[in-house]
Amino acid sequence: MKKFIIPIIIIGILTISGVILFKNKISAPKSTQTQPTSESQTSKEEKLKEAEKINYGKVFAGEIAVCQLFPKEKIEELTGKQFLEIKPGQNQTQRYTEYYCEYREEKLPYSVEHGNPPQAPKNIAISFVRGDISSLKEAYKLTQEVVKTDNAIPFTHQLIYNQEGKFLRLEGFLADDLEIIINTWWSTLTQEEAEKFVKNFALYLKDFVQEKAKTTKNAGVPLPQEEDIINNFFSLINTGEASKAVSMMKIKNDSEKQAWAVQFNAFNYVQVLKIEKANENEWNDNRHIYKITLDVIMKPESGSAPIPYYGYQNGQNIRFITLEKDGNLWKIAEIGGG
């Protein structure tokens, strides 16, 4: 009987040891698995704190000229696509104002784009929405769209997909009253290209804002820059504030002021597409000239003006703007066609 007792004891000890070793092998990875999760959460919190330091609202205060802030050459670089034209716009409601730019891969005839029903050209759209954006954050629920996020994007956001999993747009919440929307739905980007583009643009936007904020801080409180003056001038015309636009001009004759106001009221829509320096050999300390590309829609009744439509046509127009110093401020002295 004793012959059997010792082997049984040995087998029992080996069995218990095996169980202990087996438990240790199972439980050991658990302690190593929790560490990366903690580091990941810490990294995410640090990223969010860093993003909160960026004052997007301050950088994008006032009118937002999206097409000029993000020229098509930059968007072409980020997307790998080429755009035939860019189309700026502004949409105002009682709750918010939207400033947008469409980077168009095709150019449709006016009759098609504005037909019945209108047809949207293939494009990528970048919009800034300022005001009460609370309802926009929940808009995806109305169509049962799907929301995802990407930790690489350095601000609060949601990536919107349709029910079939097709990527539609990035919605970024830059401030309590400021949202950016990048819509790729109408573009020819593949799913992978669209997701890569919005992520790369988000990272570029962060660097862009940080650099702009640094420049503004170092500059103190500067006087309006020349390009800002031109943008504000045409923005006033576009919103129907002709008298304010006239006040930005270097003219003193009342009849001349009235004539300009009548002309500005003939615009149904006008937006600045591009601003370039011109005739720099003629520049001096008090006089600068710029070549402006405008997108224009004239009111039909302006066709009966002494010069039909005041020399403009629906679509793109080139004008040369001469700025002259009036004290410390630049004012618009001339608007010419060549």
Image: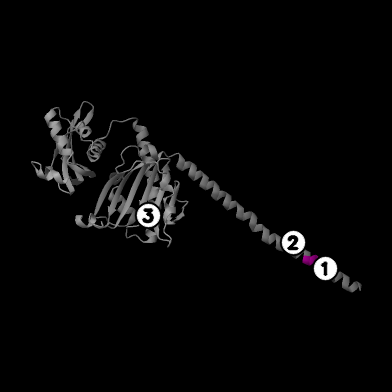
* Mark drawn on residue 20: 2
Q: Give SS at disc 1.
A: helix
Of residues 250 and 315, the one nearer the viewer is 315
Please report whichever mark, 1 or 3, sits nearer to the chain's N-terminal start: 1
Q: Name the front one of labels 1 and 3.
A: 3
Q: Position of residue 196 (x, y in %)?
A: 39, 56
Please report whichever mark, 3 or 2, sits nearer to the chain's N-terminal start: 2
Q: Residues within 10 Å of mark 2 (few under 14, many from 20)?
A: few
Residue located beneath label 3 in the image: 197
Residue 123 in view (yes/no): yes
* Kind of residue indicated by mark 2: Ile
Which span is picked out in magenta? 9-15
Residue located beneath label 1 in the image: 10
Q: Give SS at disc 2.
A: helix
* Kind of residue indicated by mark 3: Phe
- The quadrant in which the N terminus is found is bottom right
User: Between marks 3 and 2, how big is the CA–CA gap?
Assistant: 52 Å
Residue 107 in view (yes/no): no
Of residues 258 and 287, the one nearer the viewer is 258
